[in-house]
Amino acid sequence: MDGKHMQIGEVATRTELSLRTIRHYEETGLVTPSARSQGGFRLYTETDVARLMVIRRMKPLGFTLDQMRDLLDATDRLDGDGALGDGEREALLERVRTYRQAAAEQVEKLRVQLARAEDFAATLGARLEQNAPAARDRNR
């Protein structure tokens, strides 16, 4: 095996995805291993890893598998060797822009949730600090 291909275990480590998740993405058609070893092991390239990273980044933002597939299709076609007409290229770019906008909106929602969670944790911390001396006095 040359240095250009990785087995699924290395890909799982690099992407921080489980073997099961990577296999699931293969079953759903999101990522296909670039090759198979003579023994039938899945072999992946840097391009496959990059594709898995796109999926990994979309998942916590609430994108569905169909949306992931749609975005990957658009980016594959934009990056492909095939000639695209101006209208087709612009339509693909608009699809990508739509996903970028949706991602930005989800990031903002997550920022609000994180701020609320941090405020909650700080409130609990303050409450514990207020009551810590009283608890120590009772234990004496």
Image (cartoon, grey):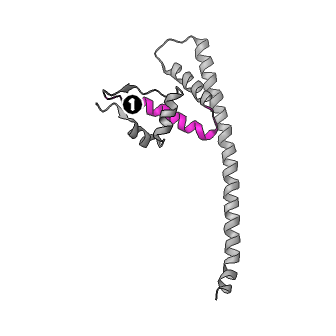
Q: Position of residue 116 (x, y in %)?
A: 71, 54
Give the residue furthest to the bottom.
140
> Where on the picture, by quarter, is residue 62?
top right
- Any magenta on residue 60? yes
Indicate whether residue 134 is drawn in magenta.
Answer: no
Amino acid, disc 1: Arg
- The residue wearing badge 1 is 42
Left-right relation of 119 to 82: right
* Residue found 51% across the figure and 33% down from its top: 24
Residue 29 percent location from the top left of the image: 52, 25
Q: Main secondary structure of the magenta part?
A: helix
Relative to 102, 50 lies left or right = left
- 138 relative position to 42: left or right: right
At label 1, counting other C-alpha atoms closer than 10 Å, the crowd grade (few under 14, some 14-19, many 20 or more) is: some
Note whether 12 is above or below 130 in the view shown: above
Residue closer to the observer: 21 or 64:
21
